[in-house]
Amino acid sequence: MSELGRQLKEARLQKGMSLDDVQEVTKIRKKYLEAIEAGDYKALPGSFYVRAFIKTYAEAVGVNPDELMQEQGMVQPPAAEPSTMETVMSQRSRRSESQRSVKWLPTVLMWVFPVLILAVIYIYASNWGHSDSEKTDPVNLTESSKLPSAAPSAGQAASPAPTHAGAGADPSAAPSVEPSPSPSPSPSPEADGTVVQDRKSGKTTVFKVTGSAPQVVIDATGESWLEVYRGTNSKGEKLNFATTASGDHFTYTLDSAGLYIKSGNSPYTTITVNGQTVTDGKTTSRILLELDSGGTGTSADGGAAGDAAGTEAGTEQSGD
């Protein structure tokens, strides 16, 4: 061991530092520090690094590098050596920082990847609900879903057009045009009839409906899943299959085929038939509406006579 190396080692031990501590402070590899303490300068990467490494080591352990090197009779280095050494050490420092950054990369990816998967699943689920809503065939909706206020009232259709006086007629003798009567409010689509709970069929509650062309109205007060089929179950003709929002309004006409309604969030779905609210009291409702053929009666223009109740209902309809 050289005298210089011995002095550096003693100064290091007095400060209670290990070679690993000096390596962390100076960014000089441990094997080069050991070579300096042993006086084996040939192990260093180049002769011009010897003074730079010794100076950095001395400063780290609290020894004046200039006095130390003067005592040992070491020649002053060229002016370019310190800058070269600083460049090499700064490059090593940047490499160590980049290595620490790379260590964090797997952890970041481990968290980002599941988040991206959840985002893709959410977007897909949202688009799936909207696409099902867009696929609903509007042709399947009955014409009764149109608001009755869109049709002109009887008073408007019957109002005569104003007459105009001829070219040779006296303007003072022209008849005055009276204003047409204000249109009367459109009649409610609700029809006369009754709605009675008839039976249970598995999870489905069956209601018997009487009346002529009963109107089934569905109003949404919030987000819900709604399915409507013409028939007795979900295998019938699909009339509606979508997510509803507050304010949605649907109207259907009940016929002999029946109407099967399934609501995924019943508290936000109101079903009325002939003005009467129909519910099975469940969160997920399955309701089957059947037209009671014994209560509809015969048509207004006459037909084959049925039983006594059918004949009486047909007579009342003709009287209307």
Image (cartoon, rainbow, N blue to C red):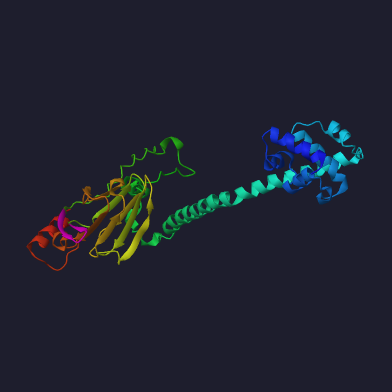
Q: Magenta segment: does it hold 199?
A: yes
Residue at 77% x, 39% y: name it.
6
User: What residue range appears in magenta?
Assistant: 196-207
Q: Predominant secondary structure in magenta? A: strand
Residue 75 in the figure: left or right of residue 262: right
Residue 208, percent from left and from top: 17, 58
Residue at 13% x, 58% y: name it.
313
Give the residue furthest to the bottom. Answer: 304
Residue 141 in the figure: left or right of residue 3: left
Dividing the picture into quarters, in which one does residue 178 lie? Answer: top left
Identify which residue, 213 or 58, lies in the foreground.
Answer: 58
Dividing the picture into quarters, in which one does residue 85 lie? Answer: top right
- Residue 56 in view in this figure: yes
Residue 99, percent from left and from top: 67, 48
Residue 192, percent from left and from top: 19, 51
Relative to residue 316, is residue 27 depicted above or below? above
Give the residue furthest to the left. Answer: 308
Dividing the picture into quarters, in which one does residue 56 lie? Answer: top right
- Residue 57 in view in this figure: no
Residue 95 in the figure: left or right of residue 311: right
Residue 241, percent from left and from top: 36, 58
> Considering the image in quadrants, where does the N terminus appear?
top right
Count of labels in the image: 0
Relative to residue 98, is residue 175 depicted above or below? above
Q: Magenta segment: does it hold 63?
A: no
Identify which residue, 317 or 147, lies in the foreground.
Answer: 147
Residue at 42% x, 39% y: name it.
174
Identify which residue, 21 or 235, lies in the foreground.
Answer: 21
Identify which residue, 46 or 274, lies in the foreground.
Answer: 46
